[in-house]
Image (cartoon, helix red, strand yellow):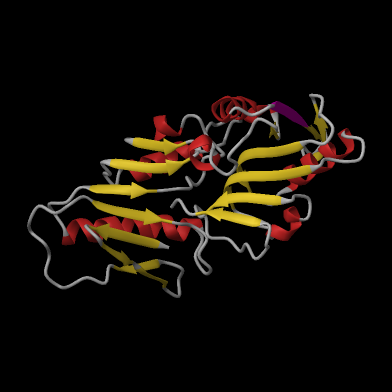
């Protein structure tokens, strides 16, 4: 879904697909263009609308900006992009592969935004790929879900998340950080299990923290590994993911956790009472 806001007026862009798959947009504004200095126009995009793919929305975003610049030629533009697509491929590891984040960065940069706001990008090099990028971190998003963190251990689901979890734990005054490591099938590379690298205290309140939940396999394996690491099982287990895609359904992951915290950065089905969605987009 794409919206633009001028002053206090917010308008949803009408979006559709032609029979050949091309995307169309309509700003739903008057016929006369506005040839005067206007407040900065904010354009927001939340992916996940039924019937439209991320690629559909990216093309619709580009066409929306083009139409806005034609209608408001004196305006500057800000982009609200809570979830940065393609950020999980931020380098070309093997011959013949693209740097997908760099490709998307060039596309967004070409639209000419004065400011781009995002939430907790997956890649640490997102600000190098996207001009004028400002981001909210995990502490900004989840730091207030508990009034007191001194009895809660933060869990990093893999080594790559450890640094961010340590920063979060320090910021909120958590009891400590527990790191897990993925066990993969050497032939296929698929995750087949999880190993807990640190001691898990008994009667634990654990807070698993990461940026994206796609299908949820990683977090299922983390929950299983943590449960077996404590005699009698974990006392309270929570999951916090900035971007809840839940592409295999939230219930697949939900049955392993007492609470799941996420944001409205991605429009996914969350019909489960344990899911608490923080409105930030």
Near-viewer residue (93 or 3): 3
- Residue 261 in the image: above or below residue 183: below
Q: Position of residue 126 (x, y in %)?
A: 45, 34
Q: Please, which residue is most extreme toward the bottom here? A: 19
- Quarter of the picture holding the N terminus: bottom left
x 50%, y 30%: residue: 124
Residue at 73% x, 28% y: name it: 178
Which x, y percent locates residue 191? 78, 39
Indicate yes or no whether the magenta region holds residue 226. Answer: no
Front residue of this view, candidates 33 and 120: 120
Region of the chain picked out in magenta, as a range? 176-181
Horizontally, is 173 left or right of 77 in the view?
A: right
Which quadrant would residue 272 be assigned to in this image? bottom right
User: Which residue appears at 66% of the width and 50% of the height?
Assistant: 260
> Would you say residue 130 is visible in this rendering?
no
Name the residue furthest right: 231
| Total residue callouts | 0
Image quarter of residue 192: top right
Q: Is residue 61 left or right of residue 234?
A: left
Dominant SS of magenta comes to: strand
Is residue 245 in view? Answer: yes
Q: Please provide percent x and percent y for residue 273.
A: 67, 62
Q: Residue at x 69, y 39 (%)?
A: 208
Report x, y in % for residue 130: 38, 36
Which residue occupies the foreground of this view, 33 or 117? 117
Q: Dividing the picture into quarters, in which one does residue 56 lie? A: bottom left
């Amino acid at each position: 879904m794409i919206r633009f806001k001028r002053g206090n007026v917010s308008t949803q862009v009408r979006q559709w697909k032609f029979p050949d798959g091309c995307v169309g947009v309509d700003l739903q504004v008057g016929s006369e263009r506005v040839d005067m200095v206007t407040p900065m126009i904010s354009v927001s995009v939340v992916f996940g609308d039924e019937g439209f793919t991320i690629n559909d929305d990216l093309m619709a975003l580009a066409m929306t900006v083009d139409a806005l610049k034609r209608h408001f030629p004196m305006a500057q533009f800000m982009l609200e992009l809570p979830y940065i697509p393609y950020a999980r491929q931020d380098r070309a590891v093997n011959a013949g592969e693209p740097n997908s984040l760099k490709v998307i960065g060039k596309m967004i940069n070409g639209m000419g935004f004065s400011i781009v706001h995002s939430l907790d990008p997956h890649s640490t090099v997102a600000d190098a790929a996207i001009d004028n990028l400002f981001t909210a971190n995990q502490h900004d998003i989840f730091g207030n879900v508990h009034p007191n963190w001194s009895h809660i251990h933060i869990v990093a689901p893999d080594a790559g998340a450890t640094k961010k979890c340590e920063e979060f734990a320090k910021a909120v005054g958590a009891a400590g950080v527990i790191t897990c490591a993925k066990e993969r099938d050497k032939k296929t590379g698929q995750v087949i299990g999880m190993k807990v690298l640190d001691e898990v205290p008994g009667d634990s309140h654990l807070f698993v923290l990461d940026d994206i939940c796609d299908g949820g396999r990683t977090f299922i394996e983390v929950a299983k590994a943590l449960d077996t690491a404590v005699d009698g099982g974990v006392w309270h287990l929570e999951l916090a993911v900035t971007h809840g895609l839940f592409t295999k359904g939230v219930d697949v992951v939900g049955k392993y956790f007492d609470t799941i915290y996420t944001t409205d950065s991605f429009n996914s089905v969350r019909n489960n009472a344990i899911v608490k969605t923080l409105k930030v987009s």
